[in-house]
Image (cartoon, rainbow, N blue to C red):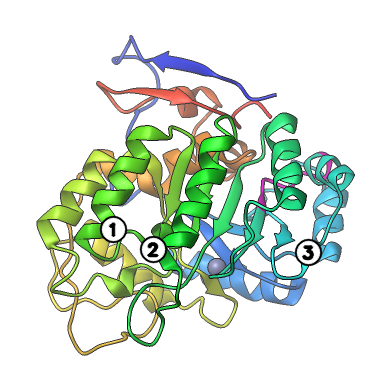
Amino acid sequence: MNKQRTHRETDRNDGPPRLYSVAHMPRVDAHVHLGDSGDARRFQGAMTRAGIALGINLSPSREMIAGTANAGRRTKTRILHAPGTYRIDKGLRWSRKDLESFKAAGCVGTKILCKYQSGLNRKAIVSKVKAQEQLGGLPLWVHVVDPPRPGFWQPGFWDRIHDAEKLIRDHPSLPVIMAHGFWLMIDDKGLDVLAGFFDRYSNLNVDLSAVFQWWDPPQPSYDRLRDFMITYADRILYGTDATASHAKKRYYENTHRILETRGRRLNGFFPADSQTYIRGFGLPKETLNRIYWWNAARLIPRVAEALSELGWGASKERFHSLPAGLDMTITTGLTN
Ligand SMILES: [Zn+2]
């Protein structure tokens, strides 16, 4: 079952540090695609070179899932799996019962791939989403649409956004992670809509996969996006959309510079879609800690445990400690 509780840190002088410095904080990539164990091996090497502690794999094969179960839970895991359970254009790939076995095997969530197709709220999909909500402890990643830009735009973009909104609203205790910033982080209009969604739906989160390269001027406005990331830092997870072949140190460093520095002439994770460059946001340490790892540790099962095993945090207690002066609702994961 979900753990619902609000934690207030009261004693700020004892115990391990609550915040990591930029140089030492763990970085969790909450959105990668690795289809077989060879991919996973190659990716793990890239993670080490790029300073990524953990990756959440949204495309594991059945063999990889079985491997998760066989490897047990204490193996210094670097890659955790969230299977793509639903694909709305091709029907459901796994049964309701499979959800329980995924959870038992140590999977950390599921994914619906819906691209720009309608049908997210079909009965057959919703019954499984409801089952996942009732099972508890497994967040749901939703891939929705392509960005509404020339060359990508698909008719019905806003219809699909509101399909997803309905799913989020109808399952309030299911943590939902909208991939690609819900495609609402690439212009000011989208940021306004997403702010409204965040205010209304406390179970909504987004990952930053494939979003960085859309942050070149003029949209979204630099100050507007920076303020947005600080305001909603506890709803945003770092992610890239990397595959084994995209997992290059320099791509990861591009994203780190964008978030951590005030650098000029920066590129996104993927090669640029245009000739303009991105300016770094130099986000505060409190914001970076949340985007890079805290939200993942809070929302995704096994992340806190895995980070602990890798050397971040002497005990689970560190992950129950919040950045100073902040209240946060822990919705799931830490004890699952
Ligand atoms: Zn993806």
State the residue in front, 111 or 144: 144
Which residue position holds label 1?
Answer: 190
Q: Secondary structure at mark 2?
A: helix
Give the side of residue 329 with respect to residue 198, left or right.
right
Residue located 72% across and 73% down the image: 35
Q: Considering only vertical position in the picture, is 214 above or below 52?
A: below
Q: Amino acid at mark 3?
A: Gly
Callout 3 secondary element: strand
N-terminal of the pair, mark 2 or mark 3, is 3
The residue at the point 43 percent across, 67 percent down is 157
Q: How many marks?
A: 3
Disc 2 target residue = 183
Q: Tell me where the magenta segment starts and ends, as one range.
A: 104-110
Q: Answer with the quadrant where ligand 1 appears in the image.
A: bottom right
* Residue 35 placement, left or right of 219: right
Which residue was labeled with disc 3?
91
Mark 3 Cα within 10 Å, few/some/many (few <14, many 20+)? few
Residue drawn at x 31%, y 86% as measured from the top left: 273
* Marks 3/1: CA–CA distance: 30 Å
Q: Is residue 106 magenta?
A: yes
